[in-house]
Image (spheres, grey):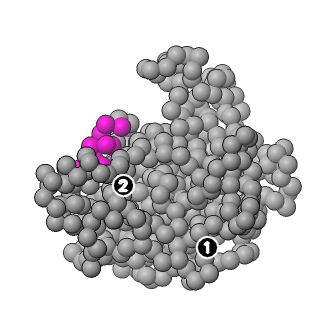
Amino acid sequence: MGGIAAAAPGAPAVASAGLLQPGKGPIHGRHYLRSRPDEVRWGYVPSVGSEPVLRMRSGETVTVDTVSHEGILEDQGRDPVSWFGRHGVPRSGVLTDAVDIARSYDRTPRSFDVDGPHVVTGPIHVDGAAPGDVLKIEVLSALPRVPYGVVSSRHGKGALPRLAGNAVPAGITEDEIMPPVATDGRATGDPRRYGNVSIFTPVRSRRGKLSGVLPPATFPLSPFMGIMGVAFASATSLTDPLLNSIPPTIGGGNIDINLLGAGATFYLPVFAEGALFYAGDPHMAMGNGEVALTAMEGSLRATYRLTVIKAGRRGAPSVAFGYPFAETGDAWIPIGLSDPDGSRDGQGNDLDVAMRRAVVNALDFLERDLKMDRAVAYAYLSAAANFEVSQVVDRTVGVHGVIRKSDFPPRP
Protein backbone atom coordinates (compact mmCIF):
# COMPACT_ATOMS: atom_id res chain seq x y z
CA MET A 1 0.00 0.00 0.00
CA GLY A 2 1.15 3.50 -0.72
CA GLY A 3 0.59 4.96 2.74
CA ILE A 4 -0.29 8.57 3.24
CA ALA A 5 -0.15 10.94 0.30
CA ALA A 6 2.58 13.55 0.50
CA ALA A 7 1.50 17.12 -0.09
CA ALA A 8 2.64 18.89 -3.19
CA PRO A 9 5.36 21.48 -2.50
CA GLY A 10 3.75 24.54 -0.98
CA ALA A 11 0.28 23.01 -1.13
CA PRO A 12 -1.78 23.66 2.02
CA ALA A 13 -4.76 21.44 2.77
CA VAL A 14 -7.04 24.49 2.92
CA ALA A 15 -6.44 27.92 1.40
CA SER A 16 -7.47 31.19 2.95
CA ALA A 17 -10.98 32.27 2.01
CA GLY A 18 -10.65 34.01 -1.33
CA LEU A 19 -11.41 33.61 -5.02
CA LEU A 20 -9.58 31.25 -7.37
CA GLN A 21 -10.68 32.12 -10.89
CA PRO A 22 -9.46 29.81 -13.67
CA GLY A 23 -5.69 30.08 -14.08
CA LYS A 24 -5.29 32.41 -11.09
CA GLY A 25 -3.62 31.63 -7.78
CA PRO A 26 -1.64 28.52 -6.79
CA ILE A 27 -1.56 25.61 -9.23
CA HIS A 28 0.55 22.82 -7.76
CA GLY A 29 0.25 20.04 -10.33
CA ARG A 30 2.46 19.34 -13.32
CA HIS A 31 -0.72 19.36 -15.39
CA TYR A 32 -3.67 21.72 -15.05
CA LEU A 33 -7.25 20.96 -16.11
CA ARG A 34 -9.89 23.67 -16.17
CA SER A 35 -13.64 23.09 -16.22
CA ARG A 36 -14.38 24.49 -19.63
CA PRO A 37 -17.76 23.58 -21.16
CA ASP A 38 -16.07 21.11 -23.52
CA GLU A 39 -14.12 19.48 -20.64
CA VAL A 40 -17.09 18.70 -18.40
CA ARG A 41 -20.25 16.62 -18.40
CA TRP A 42 -23.25 17.96 -16.51
CA GLY A 43 -25.11 15.15 -14.79
CA TYR A 44 -23.19 12.25 -16.32
CA VAL A 45 -19.81 10.54 -15.97
CA PRO A 46 -17.51 9.31 -18.75
CA SER A 47 -17.93 5.84 -20.24
CA VAL A 48 -15.17 3.35 -21.02
CA GLY A 49 -15.17 4.65 -24.61
CA SER A 50 -14.98 8.37 -23.82
CA GLU A 51 -12.32 10.59 -25.36
CA PRO A 52 -9.95 12.02 -22.75
CA VAL A 53 -9.55 15.77 -22.33
CA LEU A 54 -6.04 15.36 -20.86
CA ARG A 55 -3.29 12.72 -21.01
CA MET A 56 -0.60 12.20 -18.39
CA ARG A 57 1.98 9.67 -17.28
CA SER A 58 1.58 7.43 -14.27
CA GLY A 59 2.98 9.11 -11.16
CA GLU A 60 2.52 12.66 -12.42
CA THR A 61 0.41 15.27 -10.69
CA VAL A 62 -2.57 17.21 -11.98
CA THR A 63 -4.51 20.17 -10.62
CA VAL A 64 -8.22 20.18 -11.47
CA ASP A 65 -10.48 23.22 -11.14
CA THR A 66 -13.89 21.81 -10.29
CA VAL A 67 -17.20 23.66 -10.37
CA SER A 68 -20.08 23.17 -7.94
CA HIS A 69 -23.55 22.68 -9.38
CA GLU A 70 -25.07 24.86 -6.65
CA GLY A 71 -26.14 28.25 -7.95
CA ILE A 72 -26.45 27.08 -11.55
CA LEU A 73 -29.20 24.45 -11.37
CA GLU A 74 -32.64 24.82 -12.94
CA ASP A 75 -34.43 25.37 -9.64
CA GLN A 76 -32.00 28.23 -8.95
CA GLY A 77 -32.57 29.89 -12.32
CA ARG A 78 -29.50 28.61 -14.23
CA ASP A 79 -27.87 32.03 -13.68
CA PRO A 80 -25.14 32.03 -10.99
CA VAL A 81 -24.54 35.77 -11.20
CA SER A 82 -28.17 36.50 -10.32
CA TRP A 83 -28.55 33.68 -7.78
CA PHE A 84 -25.39 34.49 -5.81
CA GLY A 85 -26.07 38.20 -6.27
CA ARG A 86 -29.26 37.80 -4.24
CA HIS A 87 -27.04 36.57 -1.41
CA GLY A 88 -24.69 39.54 -1.52
CA VAL A 89 -22.01 38.13 -3.84
CA PRO A 90 -20.86 40.68 -6.46
CA ARG A 91 -20.47 39.62 -10.06
CA SER A 92 -16.69 39.67 -9.59
CA GLY A 93 -17.10 37.08 -6.82
CA VAL A 94 -18.71 34.48 -9.10
CA LEU A 95 -16.48 31.98 -10.92
CA THR A 96 -16.31 32.63 -14.65
CA ASP A 97 -16.25 28.91 -15.44
CA ALA A 98 -19.53 28.44 -13.55
CA VAL A 99 -21.06 31.21 -15.66
CA ASP A 100 -19.68 29.68 -18.87
CA ILE A 101 -21.03 26.20 -18.05
CA ALA A 102 -24.49 27.52 -17.16
CA ARG A 103 -24.64 29.49 -20.40
CA SER A 104 -23.24 26.76 -22.65
CA TYR A 105 -25.81 24.24 -21.52
CA ASP A 106 -28.57 26.59 -22.61
CA ARG A 107 -27.78 25.14 -26.03
CA THR A 108 -28.04 21.56 -24.69
CA PRO A 109 -31.34 21.11 -22.83
CA ARG A 110 -31.14 19.21 -19.55
CA SER A 111 -33.85 17.11 -17.96
CA PHE A 112 -34.16 18.25 -14.36
CA ASP A 113 -36.10 15.09 -13.46
CA VAL A 114 -33.55 12.69 -14.92
CA ASP A 115 -30.08 14.18 -15.22
CA GLY A 116 -27.69 14.24 -12.29
CA PRO A 117 -26.90 17.67 -10.84
CA HIS A 118 -23.11 17.36 -10.80
CA VAL A 119 -20.58 19.09 -13.04
CA VAL A 120 -18.04 16.33 -13.78
CA THR A 121 -14.59 17.32 -15.10
CA GLY A 122 -12.54 14.95 -17.28
CA PRO A 123 -11.77 12.26 -18.17
CA ILE A 124 -7.99 12.07 -17.78
CA HIS A 125 -6.08 9.29 -19.54
CA VAL A 126 -3.26 7.85 -17.40
CA ASP A 127 -0.67 6.13 -19.56
CA GLY A 128 -0.29 2.42 -18.93
CA ALA A 129 -3.54 1.84 -17.09
CA ALA A 130 -5.45 -1.21 -18.34
CA PRO A 131 -8.43 -3.24 -17.18
CA GLY A 132 -7.44 -5.31 -14.15
CA ASP A 133 -5.08 -2.65 -12.76
CA VAL A 134 -5.69 -0.21 -9.91
CA LEU A 135 -5.54 3.59 -10.16
CA LYS A 136 -4.02 5.03 -7.00
CA ILE A 137 -5.35 8.55 -6.40
CA GLU A 138 -3.38 10.59 -3.87
CA VAL A 139 -5.18 13.77 -2.81
CA LEU A 140 -2.41 16.34 -2.39
CA SER A 141 -4.52 19.43 -1.78
CA ALA A 142 -8.12 20.65 -1.91
CA LEU A 143 -8.45 24.43 -1.98
CA PRO A 144 -11.76 26.32 -1.81
CA ARG A 145 -12.16 28.48 -4.90
CA VAL A 146 -14.84 30.74 -3.38
CA PRO A 147 -15.52 32.10 0.14
CA TYR A 148 -19.01 30.60 0.31
CA GLY A 149 -20.96 27.40 -0.18
CA VAL A 150 -24.53 26.15 -0.43
CA VAL A 151 -26.47 23.37 1.31
CA SER A 152 -29.62 22.27 -0.51
CA SER A 153 -32.58 19.97 -0.15
CA ARG A 154 -34.58 19.45 -3.33
CA HIS A 155 -37.01 17.10 -5.05
CA GLY A 156 -38.42 16.26 -1.61
CA LYS A 157 -35.39 14.00 -1.07
CA GLY A 158 -32.75 13.55 1.60
CA ALA A 159 -33.09 11.36 4.69
CA LEU A 160 -36.65 12.64 5.26
CA PRO A 161 -38.13 12.42 1.75
CA ARG A 162 -41.50 12.30 0.14
CA LEU A 163 -41.71 9.04 -1.78
CA ALA A 164 -43.19 8.34 -5.21
CA GLY A 165 -46.92 8.95 -5.31
CA ASN A 166 -46.60 11.30 -2.32
CA ALA A 167 -46.15 8.32 -0.01
CA VAL A 168 -44.75 8.92 3.46
CA PRO A 169 -41.69 6.81 4.35
CA ALA A 170 -41.82 4.49 7.32
CA GLY A 171 -40.68 5.90 10.62
CA ILE A 172 -41.87 9.50 10.19
CA THR A 173 -45.14 11.32 9.73
CA GLU A 174 -46.14 13.55 6.82
CA ASP A 175 -45.53 16.62 8.96
CA GLU A 176 -41.92 15.51 9.47
CA ILE A 177 -41.00 15.31 5.78
CA MET A 178 -38.33 17.85 4.78
CA PRO A 179 -38.48 20.32 3.20
CA PRO A 180 -42.00 20.97 4.52
CA VAL A 181 -43.24 22.64 1.34
CA ALA A 182 -45.07 21.51 -1.80
CA THR A 183 -42.99 19.50 -4.27
CA ASP A 184 -45.32 19.58 -7.26
CA GLY A 185 -42.78 20.49 -9.94
CA ARG A 186 -43.23 17.15 -11.66
CA ALA A 187 -46.88 17.95 -12.30
CA THR A 188 -46.26 21.51 -13.47
CA GLY A 189 -43.01 20.92 -15.36
CA ASP A 190 -41.47 23.89 -13.54
CA PRO A 191 -38.23 23.02 -11.67
CA ARG A 192 -38.66 26.12 -9.50
CA ARG A 193 -41.67 24.44 -7.85
CA TYR A 194 -39.87 21.37 -6.51
CA GLY A 195 -39.73 22.62 -2.95
CA ASN A 196 -36.03 23.44 -3.19
CA VAL A 197 -34.50 24.97 -0.07
CA SER A 198 -30.96 26.24 -0.70
CA ILE A 199 -29.09 27.67 2.28
CA PHE A 200 -26.31 30.09 1.34
CA THR A 201 -23.37 29.46 3.67
CA PRO A 202 -20.59 32.05 3.98
CA VAL A 203 -17.03 31.08 4.89
CA ARG A 204 -15.27 32.81 7.77
CA SER A 205 -11.48 32.92 8.10
CA ARG A 206 -9.88 33.31 11.52
CA ARG A 207 -6.22 32.72 12.30
CA GLY A 208 -5.75 30.79 9.09
CA LYS A 209 -8.67 28.42 9.74
CA LEU A 210 -11.81 28.38 7.65
CA SER A 211 -15.30 27.80 9.02
CA GLY A 212 -18.77 27.60 7.58
CA VAL A 213 -21.43 29.79 9.18
CA LEU A 214 -25.03 28.63 9.66
CA PRO A 215 -26.20 30.88 12.53
CA PRO A 216 -25.88 30.35 15.38
CA ALA A 217 -23.52 27.50 14.47
CA THR A 218 -20.04 27.64 13.00
CA PHE A 219 -18.19 24.52 11.92
CA PRO A 220 -14.75 23.75 10.46
CA LEU A 221 -14.31 23.25 6.75
CA SER A 222 -12.90 19.92 5.58
CA PRO A 223 -12.78 20.13 1.78
CA PHE A 224 -12.96 16.96 -0.28
CA MET A 225 -14.22 15.82 -3.65
CA GLY A 226 -17.53 13.96 -3.50
CA ILE A 227 -16.92 12.47 -6.95
CA MET A 228 -13.65 10.76 -7.86
CA GLY A 229 -13.97 7.94 -10.34
CA VAL A 230 -12.76 5.97 -13.32
CA ALA A 231 -14.80 4.98 -16.35
CA PHE A 232 -16.83 1.89 -15.44
CA ALA A 233 -19.77 1.41 -17.81
CA SER A 234 -20.14 1.04 -21.55
CA ALA A 235 -22.89 3.26 -22.91
CA THR A 236 -24.75 4.00 -26.10
CA SER A 237 -25.00 7.76 -25.53
CA LEU A 238 -23.59 10.54 -23.35
CA THR A 239 -26.83 10.50 -21.33
CA ASP A 240 -27.20 6.73 -20.94
CA PRO A 241 -28.79 6.05 -17.50
CA LEU A 242 -25.77 3.87 -16.65
CA LEU A 243 -23.67 7.05 -16.73
CA ASN A 244 -25.87 9.14 -14.43
CA SER A 245 -23.65 10.99 -11.96
CA ILE A 246 -25.81 10.36 -8.88
CA PRO A 247 -25.22 6.71 -7.89
CA PRO A 248 -21.66 5.57 -7.07
CA THR A 249 -20.38 2.37 -8.64
CA ILE A 250 -17.45 -0.04 -8.37
CA GLY A 251 -15.63 2.55 -10.47
CA GLY A 252 -16.09 5.12 -7.69
CA GLY A 253 -17.90 8.24 -8.81
CA ASN A 254 -20.22 9.88 -6.29
CA ILE A 255 -18.66 8.03 -3.37
CA ASP A 256 -19.22 10.91 -0.87
CA ILE A 257 -16.82 9.84 1.90
CA ASN A 258 -15.77 12.84 3.95
CA LEU A 259 -12.39 11.32 4.91
CA LEU A 260 -11.09 11.70 1.34
CA GLY A 261 -9.62 15.18 1.68
CA ALA A 262 -6.01 16.29 1.42
CA GLY A 263 -3.67 13.52 2.57
CA ALA A 264 -6.01 10.66 1.72
CA THR A 265 -5.42 7.96 -0.89
CA PHE A 266 -8.25 6.45 -2.91
CA TYR A 267 -7.82 3.21 -4.86
CA LEU A 268 -10.08 2.22 -7.77
CA PRO A 269 -10.11 -0.84 -10.01
CA VAL A 270 -9.53 0.03 -13.67
CA PHE A 271 -12.03 -0.93 -16.39
CA ALA A 272 -10.82 1.10 -19.39
CA GLU A 273 -7.57 1.78 -21.19
CA GLY A 274 -6.04 4.81 -19.51
CA ALA A 275 -8.41 4.47 -16.51
CA LEU A 276 -10.20 7.71 -17.58
CA PHE A 277 -10.21 9.49 -14.23
CA TYR A 278 -12.75 12.22 -13.50
CA ALA A 279 -13.69 14.43 -10.55
CA GLY A 280 -16.56 16.65 -9.43
CA ASP A 281 -19.14 17.37 -6.73
CA PRO A 282 -16.73 19.48 -4.66
CA HIS A 283 -17.58 19.73 -0.97
CA MET A 284 -16.33 22.18 1.62
CA ALA A 285 -17.76 20.15 4.50
CA MET A 286 -20.07 17.17 4.94
CA GLY A 287 -21.42 15.22 7.87
CA ASN A 288 -21.71 11.45 7.60
CA GLY A 289 -25.02 10.61 5.96
CA GLU A 290 -25.32 13.89 4.01
CA VAL A 291 -28.88 13.85 5.30
CA ALA A 292 -30.35 17.01 3.70
CA LEU A 293 -29.36 15.75 0.19
CA THR A 294 -26.25 17.88 -0.34
CA ALA A 295 -23.15 18.68 1.65
CA MET A 296 -21.86 22.22 1.99
CA GLU A 297 -21.21 22.43 -1.74
CA GLY A 298 -18.55 24.75 -3.07
CA SER A 299 -16.08 24.76 -5.95
CA LEU A 300 -12.59 23.40 -5.18
CA ARG A 301 -9.16 23.31 -6.80
CA ALA A 302 -7.81 19.82 -6.16
CA THR A 303 -4.36 18.42 -6.89
CA TYR A 304 -3.84 14.68 -7.36
CA ARG A 305 -1.03 12.27 -8.01
CA LEU A 306 -2.35 9.49 -10.26
CA THR A 307 -0.36 6.24 -10.28
CA VAL A 308 -1.08 2.96 -12.03
CA ILE A 309 -0.64 -0.19 -9.93
CA LYS A 310 -0.38 -3.13 -12.31
CA ALA A 311 -2.29 -6.32 -11.65
CA GLY A 312 -0.27 -8.66 -9.45
CA ARG A 313 2.02 -5.92 -8.17
CA ARG A 314 2.28 -4.48 -4.68
CA GLY A 315 1.27 -0.90 -3.98
CA ALA A 316 -2.48 -1.24 -3.50
CA PRO A 317 -4.69 -3.20 -1.09
CA SER A 318 -5.78 -6.51 -2.59
CA VAL A 319 -9.45 -5.52 -2.22
CA ALA A 320 -8.86 -2.51 -4.49
CA PHE A 321 -8.42 -4.70 -7.56
CA GLY A 322 -12.16 -5.37 -7.45
CA TYR A 323 -13.74 -2.67 -5.26
CA PRO A 324 -13.07 0.94 -4.13
CA PHE A 325 -10.83 1.21 -1.07
CA ALA A 326 -9.26 4.18 0.72
CA GLU A 327 -6.79 5.08 3.41
CA THR A 328 -5.59 8.06 5.40
CA GLY A 329 -2.50 8.46 7.55
CA ASP A 330 -4.46 7.06 10.49
CA ALA A 331 -6.83 4.50 9.03
CA TRP A 332 -7.68 1.97 6.35
CA ILE A 333 -11.15 2.51 4.89
CA PRO A 334 -12.99 -0.48 3.38
CA ILE A 335 -16.11 0.57 1.48
CA GLY A 336 -19.51 -1.01 0.92
CA LEU A 337 -22.19 0.06 -1.58
CA SER A 338 -25.79 -1.14 -1.70
CA ASP A 339 -26.00 -1.58 -5.48
CA PRO A 340 -22.70 -0.82 -7.20
CA ASP A 341 -23.37 -2.11 -10.71
CA GLY A 342 -24.50 1.19 -12.22
CA SER A 343 -28.25 0.56 -12.03
CA ARG A 344 -28.18 -2.30 -14.51
CA ASP A 345 -30.93 -4.17 -12.66
CA GLY A 346 -32.80 -1.37 -10.96
CA GLN A 347 -31.53 0.53 -7.96
CA GLY A 348 -31.24 -0.85 -4.44
CA ASN A 349 -30.67 1.48 -1.49
CA ASP A 350 -30.58 -0.95 1.42
CA LEU A 351 -28.04 0.16 4.04
CA ASP A 352 -27.88 -3.42 5.35
CA VAL A 353 -26.46 -4.54 2.00
CA ALA A 354 -23.87 -1.74 2.04
CA MET A 355 -22.93 -2.62 5.62
CA ARG A 356 -22.43 -6.30 4.81
CA ARG A 357 -20.21 -5.50 1.85
CA ALA A 358 -18.12 -3.08 3.92
CA VAL A 359 -17.62 -5.78 6.56
CA VAL A 360 -16.71 -8.44 3.97
CA ASN A 361 -14.23 -6.07 2.31
CA ALA A 362 -12.74 -5.27 5.72
CA LEU A 363 -12.37 -8.98 6.49
CA ASP A 364 -10.78 -9.66 3.11
CA PHE A 365 -8.28 -6.86 3.68
CA LEU A 366 -7.37 -7.97 7.20
CA GLU A 367 -6.99 -11.58 6.16
CA ARG A 368 -5.16 -11.14 2.85
CA ASP A 369 -3.07 -8.03 3.49
CA LEU A 370 -2.48 -8.08 7.27
CA LYS A 371 -2.44 -11.91 7.51
CA MET A 372 -5.03 -11.95 10.27
CA ASP A 373 -7.09 -15.06 10.97
CA ARG A 374 -10.55 -14.35 9.54
CA ALA A 375 -12.43 -15.29 12.72
CA VAL A 376 -10.07 -13.15 14.78
CA ALA A 377 -10.51 -10.32 12.28
CA TYR A 378 -14.30 -10.55 12.65
CA ALA A 379 -13.90 -10.28 16.41
CA TYR A 380 -11.50 -7.35 16.02
CA LEU A 381 -13.92 -5.43 13.80
CA SER A 382 -16.65 -5.88 16.40
CA ALA A 383 -14.39 -4.80 19.24
CA ALA A 384 -12.44 -1.93 17.75
CA ALA A 385 -13.42 -0.75 14.24
CA ASN A 386 -16.06 1.81 13.37
CA PHE A 387 -18.51 1.51 10.49
CA GLU A 388 -20.00 4.82 9.38
CA VAL A 389 -22.79 5.76 7.00
CA SER A 390 -21.15 7.53 4.07
CA GLN A 391 -24.38 8.86 2.59
CA VAL A 392 -28.06 7.90 2.32
CA VAL A 393 -29.06 10.15 -0.60
CA ASP A 394 -27.36 8.87 -3.78
CA ARG A 395 -29.79 6.06 -4.72
CA THR A 396 -26.93 3.63 -4.10
CA VAL A 397 -26.16 4.20 -0.41
CA GLY A 398 -22.80 3.68 1.23
CA VAL A 399 -21.12 2.50 4.42
CA HIS A 400 -17.40 2.70 5.10
CA GLY A 401 -15.28 1.16 7.81
CA VAL A 402 -12.52 2.93 9.73
CA ILE A 403 -9.72 0.60 10.86
CA ARG A 404 -7.07 2.34 12.97
CA LYS A 405 -3.54 1.74 11.74
CA SER A 406 -2.24 2.29 15.28
CA ASP A 407 -3.90 -0.98 16.37
CA PHE A 408 -1.44 -2.97 14.23
CA PRO A 409 2.35 -3.42 14.11
CA PRO A 410 4.11 -1.05 11.68
CA ARG A 411 4.16 -2.34 8.13
CA PRO A 412 7.35 -2.38 6.06
Q: Give the residue pinned by disc 1.
A: 12
| Left or right placement of residue 64 versus residue 98 in this view | left
Q: Residue at x 37, y 73 (%)?
A: 3
The residue lying toward the viewer, choosing from 205 and 259, is 205
Give the quadrant of the N terminus: bottom left
Magenta range: 351-360
Q: Position of residue 224 (x, y in %)?
A: 55, 59
Mark 2, residue position: 402
Q: Of 220 and 394, which appears nearest the observer?
A: 220
Whether the magenta-drawn stretch holds residue 291 is answered as no
Q: Position of residue 348 (x, y in %)?
A: 36, 36
Q: Residues within 10 Å of mark 1 (few under 14, many from 20)?
A: some
Instruction: Determine the residue positioned at 37% across, 62% down.
Output: 331
Please indicate, yes or no, whether residue 23 appears anywhere in the rendered image.
Answer: yes
**Looking at the image, residue 279 lies above or below residue 81:** below
| 104 sits to left or right of 251 | right
